[in-house]
Image: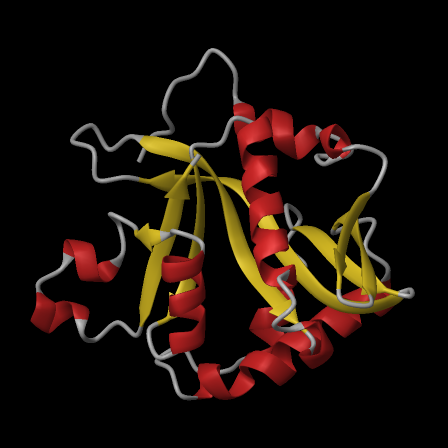
Amino acid sequence: MNNSVNTQDFIKVANEADNVVDFLGPSIKYECDDMVINIEYYTITTLPTKLKEWAFDLLKSNMENLYKGSNLGWNSKQKRQEMNDKDCKYLIASNNEKPIGFAMFQFTWEETMADDDKEIEVIYCYEIQLAEEARRKGLGTFLMRTLENIGKNWKMNKVMLTTFKKNKLAMDFYINRLGYQIDEISPSEVLLPKEAKDYDYEILSIKL
């Protein structure tokens, strides 16, 4: 498919920016209960090795069993490669300098169901993971809303993400709490029911 023609390539502009969260001010903070959580932005080249390993370990702890029960299966090497893609960007949430959660995202082109095979600019959330002590405090909502603000600022059309159908908590969080919808390119939208049932994930999105 061909990328949509623009007078300006917003994906290129965003990916070449030194800091895509500058517009949010000198610091990003979220306060809840007895926590003052700092959110720091990193590109894959500025993310310290120690944080890379921490992020992978948290993802593995939270998601390995879900992956093993899916059609994809769990592949540590492949997941590490995905998390180290050259266009990956991270928001790392820390409390008292201890990392407790992260969001991993990219600015990218995504297909649509338009007749002209048009592709649109999106901010794609590939991972959002929280440590146990950071859950049920509104941090996940704050990180997702922050991604939405980043997407709006850089002129993306949507925030998109993929989640397993059997991850009921995640599906409820995105759809019922945040207002995301099953995207037009999700298997359940483009395939017959008997074909779609072979896919154990949904693609969700929210328009910006």
Q: Is residue 106 visible?
A: yes
Place residue 140 in its image quadrant.
bottom right
Left or right for 50, reference 123: right
Figure check: 19 above or below 106? above
User: Percent position (x, y) of residue 135?
Assistant: 64, 73
How is the rendered protein coloured? secondary structure
User: Percent position (x, y) of residue 84?
Assistant: 68, 59
Figure check: 155 above or below 42? above
Q: Residue at x 54, y 80 (%)?
A: 63
Place residue 198 in its image quadrant.
bottom left
Give the total number of marks visible in the rendering: 0
Q: Residue at x 24, y 47 (%)?
A: 184
Which residue is farthest front?
33
In the picture, the quarter occupied by the C terminus is top left
**Looking at the image, which is closer to me, 106 or 147?**
147
Left or right for 94, reference 32: right
User: Percent position (x, y) of residue 201?
Assistant: 33, 69
Q: Residue at x 43, y 16 (%)?
A: 6
Left or right for 204, reference 44: left
Which residue is farthest top?
7
Figure check: 198 above or below 8? below
Figure check: 156 above or below 29? above
Q: Is residue 82 visible?
A: no
Left or right for 4, reference 190: right
In the picture, the quarter occupied by the N terminus is top left
User: Percent position (x, y) of residue 35?
Assistant: 81, 65
